[in-house]
C-alpha cells in the first residue's frame, strides 16, 4: 500500500518516540529527521533506522521536500521556533502537525474533534500538550452529556519525562492546556495544574479531572460516557486507564486516570510522552488516509495564513 | 565550641509572617477581607517587616483541588496593601499552578516581594517566574519546598540554579515539618558557603514535630537571615513557627528583629486566635506528617477522607508518603483513599 512521506523536526525524546510509532504505521512513512546538533544521539538513531537526516534545522530539509515527496511534517521542537518552521513548510504544501504548545493552528484531541478537522483544508494542527491529551477527552465525555461550567485538570508527570523545553516554558504549557480544557473539552471555564514529581522509581503519569456541571449530574449517563471515552483513547494509547471514579459530590464529577506508555523509546512511566506522540500519529494518519483516497489535496500556502 | 547564643547574638533577622497565606490552608481559604486587614494592620503596627498574602497554594491556587478562596488573590492583596504602612506584602507563586499574568496582577495590586516555589529538585521550572519577578522589580525569592527529600549537596545545586535565574534570596523550606536541627544546620550552612555573599538565605518551618523555633534558631546560627513564621502559628499541619514565640526567643538571645514583642503577642492572642476553628496542635495526624515527611497541607483532605470512607487519616498520610507524593498533589489524597477503601471493601 502507498504511504504518505513524513519528516520529523526535533530528534529528542518526543521526536524519537514518534519515529518508532510512524515506522509501524500503515499509511505514514518517516523519511527525514531534522535536528540542529550535528552528531546528536537522536539524529544518529534516525540515520541507523534508515532516515535521511540534517543538522541544519528546517532550512536543511526545505531543499529536499519536493524531490522526496514529503507531505506531512511533525514539529517536536519548541513553541518559540514553531511558527517559523511551520511557515517555511506550509509554503511548500507540507501539512504541519505541531507537538509544541505554540497553538497557532486548530487544537486537536483525536477522540474529541479529529473528525471536525477533516475537510477544513487546515495546514497546521496543534496537539495541545500531553496534559491536554490525557485529560480533555474526559472533560468532553462529561460535557457531551450535560453543560460543564468549570473543568479543572491536574497532571502529574515524572521529572525524568519532562524535558528542558517544557521546563523553560512551563507558563505556555499551563496556559495552552487551560485554554484547551475549555475550548476543546467543552467547559465554560478551564484550569490546568501541572506537577513534576521526581520520585524514584519514576511515577507513571497521573491525571485528575474535575468537572463542575451546571445542573445535577446525570450519574449513569456520565459514567457510561466516561467509560466509552476511555475505550476510545485506548484505541491508540492502550495504557490509558480509569483508575478511580467517576465519583459524584454535589455538582462535582471527579475522574482519576493513569497513563502508561507503550515503552517504544521512552520508558513506560512516560505515558505523557506516549499519549502525545500517539495522538500526533493518529491525527496525521487521518489526513494521510484522506490524501490517499483523494479526499484531501494539500496546497502550498503563499502568504502566512 | 561556640554556643548557639555566640553565633546569633547581634544578628539582624527579618521575620516574615505567613498566617495570611499558609494559614489560609488551616482556614480552608475562607479568611474574610476584614479579618485579613485586621491581622495585617496589627502585624504592621508590631513592626513585622514582611507579610505574605495569597491563597494557601499561591497565586491561582483557588481551585477544586486545593479549595476555592472566599475572595480572589486580587481582592486580598489589594485590601491588605491599602491598609499597611511599613510592611512589604509578599505573595507565593508556584509555576505549574500560577501563571505569569497572575504575578503581574499581584505586583499591580501592591505586592513587592514574591516567593517563587518549586519542589526541591525541580528548580529549573522557576526560570520564567523568577525572571519576571526581577523584571517587575520585586524582592525575588527562590523557595525550595520539601527540602528534606533531597541530600544537602543536591539542594545546593538547585539553589545555585535559582540564584542564576536572578533570585536574591533562597529558602530552605521544611514543608513537611520533618527536619531536626542538625539537618537544618547542614543545609543552611551549605547554602551560605555556596551562594554569593549578597544572596540572602531563608528558612520556613512547620511545627509538626514541635521543632519550629529550634529549627529556625539553628537556621539563623548557620547563616539564615529571613525566618518565616505565623502569628499564633496559624499554618498548615501543626502550623508554622509561632512568630511571637520566635520573637520572644530572639529577644532573649539578642537577635535583632525590629519587632515589638508585646504587640506581636497581642496580635496573635487578640486577632488571630479568635478566628481559628481550632488552634494548630500537633495531633496524631500532624505528628504523622512530620514523622513520615508528608506535605503539611495534605492534613485536611486526609481528615476529610477519614470521615468519608471510614479510613484512618494517619494510614492515608503514611501511604501518600510511601508513594512519594509532593506538594500540589492534593488530588492524589482522594484517589489514594478510594483505592484503599476499595481494597478494604469499604466501598
Image: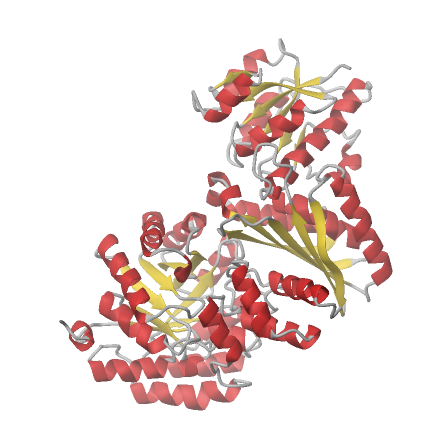
Q: Is residue A296 visible?
A: no
B168 to B52, vertically: above or below: above
Residue drawn where x is 49% and y is 40% of the image? A163
Is residue B242 or residue A230 the one in the foreground? A230
Residue drawn where x is 77% and y is 20% of the image? A291
Q: Residue furthest left?
A: B1
- Total tally of numbered discs in the picture: 0
Quadrant assignment, res A15: top right
How is the model colour-coded? Answer: secondary structure
The N terminus of chain B lies in which quarter of the figure?
Answer: bottom left
Q: Is residue A287 visible?
A: yes
Is residue A8 or residue B344 the one in the foreground? B344
**Image location of residue A222, percent across then percent down:** 82, 57
Quadrant assignment, res A238: top right
The C terminus of chain B lies in which quarter of the figure?
Answer: bottom right
**Image location of residue A7, percent across then percent down:** 61, 21
Q: Residue furthest top?
A: A67
B4 to A300, vertically: above or below: below
B159 to A293, vertically: above or below: below
Is residue A172 or residue A261 the one in the foreground? A261
* A21 sits to left or right of B218: right
**Image location of residue B317, percent across then percent down:** 55, 68
A3 to A247, vertically: above or below: above
**Image location of residue A303, percent across then percent down:** 62, 23
Amino acid at each position: 500500500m502507498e504511504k504518505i512521506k513524513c519528516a520529523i523536526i526535533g530528534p529528542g525524546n518526543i521526536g524519537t518516540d514518534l519515529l518508532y510509532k510512524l515506522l509501524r504505521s500503515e499509511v505514514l512513512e518517516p523519511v527525514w529527521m531534522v535536528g540542529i546538533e550535528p552528531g546528536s544521539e537522536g539524529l544518529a538513531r534516525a540515520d541507523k533506522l534508515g532516515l535521511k537526516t540534517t543538522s541544519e534545522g528546517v532550512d536543511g530539509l526545505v531543499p529536499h521536500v519536493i524531490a522526496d515527496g514529503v507531505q506531512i511534517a511533525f514539529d517536536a521542537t519548541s513553541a518559540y521556533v514553531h511558527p517559523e518552521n511551520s511557515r517555511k513548510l506550509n509554503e511548500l504544501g507540507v501539512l504541519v502537525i505541531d507537538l509544541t504548545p505554540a497553538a497557532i493552528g486548530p487544537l486537536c484531541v483525536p477522540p474529541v474533534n479529529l473528525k471536525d478537522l477533516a475537510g477544513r483544508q487546515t495546514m497546521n494542527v496543534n496537539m495541545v500538550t500531553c496534559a491536554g491529551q490525557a485529560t480533555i477527552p474526559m472533560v468532553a465525555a462529561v460535557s457531551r452529556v450535560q453543560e460543564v461550567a468549570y473543568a479543572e485538570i491536574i497532571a502529574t508527570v515524572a521529572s525524568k519525562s519532562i524535558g528542558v523545553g517544557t521546563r523553560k516554558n512551563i507558563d505556555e504549557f499551563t496556559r495552552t492546556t487551560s485554554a484547551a480544557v475549555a475550548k476543546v473539552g467543552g467547559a465554560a471555564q478551564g484550569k490546568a495544574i501541572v506537577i513534576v514529581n521526581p520520585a524514584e522509581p519514576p511515577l507513571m503519569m497521573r491525571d485528575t479531572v474535575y468537572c463542575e456541571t451546571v445542573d445535577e449530574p446525570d450519574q449513569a449517563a456520565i459514567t457510561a460516557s466516561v467509560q466509552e471515552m476511555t475505550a476510545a483513547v485506548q484505541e491508540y494509547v492502550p495504557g490509558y486507564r480509569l483508575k478511580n471514579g467517576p465519583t459524584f459530590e454535589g455538582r462535582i464529577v471527579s475522574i482519576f486516570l493513569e497513563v502508561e506508555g507503550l515503552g517504544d523509546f521512552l520508558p513506560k512511566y512516560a505515558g505523557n510522552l506516549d499519549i502525545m506522540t500517539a495522538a500526533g500519529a493518529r491525527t496525521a494518519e487521518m489526513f494521510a488516509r484522506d490524501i490517499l483516497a483523494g479526499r484531501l489535496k494539500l496546497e502550498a500556502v503563499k502568504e502566512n495564513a | 565550641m561556640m554556643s548557639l547564643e555566640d553565633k546569633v547574638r547581634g544578628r539582624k533577622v527579618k521575620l516574615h509572617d505567613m498566617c495570611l497565606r499558609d494559614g489560609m490552608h488551616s482556614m480552608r481559604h475562607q479568611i474574610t477581607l476584614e479579618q485579613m486587614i485586621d491581622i495585617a494592620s496589627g502585624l504592621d503596627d508590631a513592626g513585622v517587616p514582611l507579610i505574605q498574602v495569597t491563597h494557601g497554594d499561591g497565586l491561582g491556587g483557588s481551585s477544586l483541588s486545593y479549595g476555592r478562596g472566599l475572595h480572589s488573590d486580587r481582592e486580598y492583596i489589594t485590601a491588605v496593601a491599602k491598609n499597611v504602612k511599613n510592611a512589604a506584602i509578599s505573595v507565593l507563586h508556584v509555576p505549574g499552578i500560577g501563571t505569569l499574568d497572575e504575578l503581574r496582577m499581584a505586583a499591580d495590586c501592591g505586592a513587592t516581594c514574591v516567593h517563587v516555589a518549586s519542589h526541591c529538585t525541580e528548580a529549573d521550572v522557576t526560570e520564567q517566574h523568577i525572571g519576571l519577578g526581577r523584571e517587575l522589580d520585586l524582592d525575588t525569592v527562590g523557595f525550595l519546598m520539601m527540602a528534606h527529600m533531597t541530600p544537602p549537596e543536591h539542594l545546593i545545586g538547585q539553589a545555585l540554579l535559582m540564584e542564576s535565574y536572578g533570585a536574591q534570596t533562597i529558602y530552605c523550606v521544611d514543608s513537611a515539618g520533618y527536619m531536626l536541627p542538625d539537618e537544618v544546620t547542614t543545609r543552611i550552612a551549605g547554602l551560605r558557603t555556596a551562594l554569593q555573599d549578597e544572596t540572602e538565605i531563608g528558612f520556613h518551618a512547620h511545627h509538626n514535630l514541635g521543632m519550629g523555633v529550634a529549627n529556625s534558631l539553628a537556621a539563623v546560627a548557620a547563616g539564615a537571615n529571613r525566618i518565616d513564621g505565623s502569628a499564633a502559628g496559624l499554618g498548615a499541619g501543626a502550623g508554622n513557627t509561632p512568630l511571637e514565640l520566635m520573637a520572644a526567643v530572639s529577644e532573649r538571645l539578642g537577635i535583632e528583629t525590629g519587632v515589638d514583642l508585646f504587640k506581636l503577642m497581642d496580635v496573635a492572642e487578640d486577632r488571630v486566635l479568635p478566628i481559628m476553628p481550632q488552634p494548630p496542635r500537633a495531633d496524631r495526624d500532624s505528628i504523622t506528617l512530620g514523622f513520615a515527611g508528608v506535605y503539611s497541607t495534605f492534613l485536611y483532605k486526609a481528615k476529610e477522607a477519614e470521615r468519608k470512607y471510614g479510613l484512618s487519616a494517619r494510614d492515608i498520610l503514611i501511604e501518600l508518603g510511601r508513594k512519594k507524593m509532593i506538594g500540589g498533589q492534593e488530588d492524589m489524597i482522594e484517589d489514594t483513599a478510594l483505592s484503599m477503601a476499595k481494597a478494604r471493601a469499604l466501598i
